[in-house]
Amino acid sequence: MLNQDTVREATRLTRAGELVEATALLQRMLQGDSAPGPRSRSAAQAPLARLAPPTIDAKADVVEERENRETLQARSAQGRKRASPLDGMREFTGLGLRGPITRAPPSTSDIVPDGTKFIAGTFSNAAGSRTYKLFIPSRSQGQQLPLVVMLHGCTQSPDDFAAGTRMNFLAEEQNCFVVYPEQPSGANQAKCWNWFRSGDQRRGGGEPSLIAGITRLIMRDHAIDPKRVYVAGLSAGGAAAAIMGATYPDLYASVGIHSGLACGAASDLPSAFVAMRQGGGSKAIADAKPYVPTIVFHGDRDTTVHPNNGDRIIEQSAKATSPTTKVLRGRVPHGHAYSRTVLTDGGGRAISEHWNIHGAGHAWSGGSPAGSYTDARGPDATREMLRFFLEHSLGG
């Protein structure tokens, strides 16, 4: 049960710029101490580790230089890139907290296959400016190709996200362009997309206008099929992808959300904290019709973004379409078991999928150890997302 006095006090602190104090107050509320009474300055300045929400693993592993690649891969298979205890706060506050422990950037061979291009660009509009990286497949001439927009999570970069998801390698197989907009630390200190701010949940303004602008720029400058443009993301990027599908259903044919939240799950810091820790409801978005087909991946042991958030995304689909539901179960050899819920419309077309990954935390399922926040034990979210995307087209 939420204490509304506590939420109001946390909102006041947020507006006053006291983000650490607001986060500490909300943390106490969720731990059962709901009294919003006065707190001493020393309490507000308690070590950040005490203010962080609980996670499966209490620390990020230090990678020492003497460890070889085989050791790193083995540790990745055991969940090496699990969530830091500060991730729950870093995900939406941007308090200047440290990202993952410093690691060497991925090599080019981990990011793109031979014979392809990965070029940098910049887009600007009234909302600001964002850089991006664009993957161009080797067989890009002579036809209009699909485009996938990939939105990274907090503390990540386009190179890191590309290496971890290996989306460029799958895109080369399927002959697709992929673009990775980059959130700078100047927009959010932890490089999180600001999914929880109402000004960044609207068509034609804020970060959605920048992401849509980058999408349209690539469509203008390259041979892109306008009916096969897709958007996906991880964590804060997954929440941003949900916003893009809700606010630009005429631009994106389908959406992929990994460990994210539904559009409208939060509108400020206090509601973001509650949504991440407990699972958030989602308000109706005026521009969200027609419903955009969506595929969701979420680990059922994710303690950074509550697994209930994946359920909320699928509930939006069910309300919009009155589908038929089918549940399939499986297990990756030597990896995770999963439950895959498929919602189909009256014509038998899959309009949404929810992959509930049993035992998985806050990491890209089936990802590569070359990137951060990945879990190599699968299932392969990148392959399944791209498969789902290419089954859908605008007006199809």
Image (tube, rainbow, N blue to C red):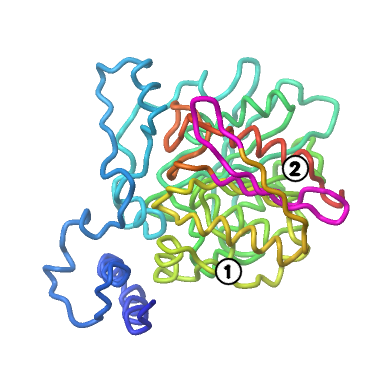
Q: Which mark is residue 235?
A: none
Query: Relative to residue 396, is residue 203 depicted above or below?
Result: below
State whether residue 21 appears in this view: yes
**Residue extent of the magenta highlight:** 330-356
Left or right placement of residue 182 versus residue 90 in this view: right
Q: Secondary structure at mark 1?
A: loop
Amino acid carrying label 1: it is Ser
Left or right placement of residue 244 versus residue 155 in this view: right
Q: Which residue is rendered at x = 32% and y = 79% of the image?
A: 6
Amino acid carrying label 2: it is Met
- The answer to which of 340 and 391 lies nearer the viewer is 340
Residue 265 % position (x, y): 53, 66
Q: Which residue is rendered at x = 63% and y = 47% of the image?
A: 256
Figure quadrant of the N terminus: bottom left
Q: Which residue is mark 1?
A: 282
Which of the two discs, 2 and 1, sits closer to the camera? 1
Query: Relative to residue 367, is residue 341 depicted above or below?
Result: below
Q: Secondary structure at mark 2?
A: helix
- Is 334 magenta? The answer is yes
The quarter holding residue 105 reads: top left
Q: Which mark is residue 219?
A: 2
- The answer to which of 114 and 69 lies nearer the viewer is 69
Residue 103 % position (x, y): 33, 29
Question: Mostly what secondary structure, the magenta segment?
Answer: strand
State whether residue 214 appears in this view: no
The quarter holding residue 371 reads: top left
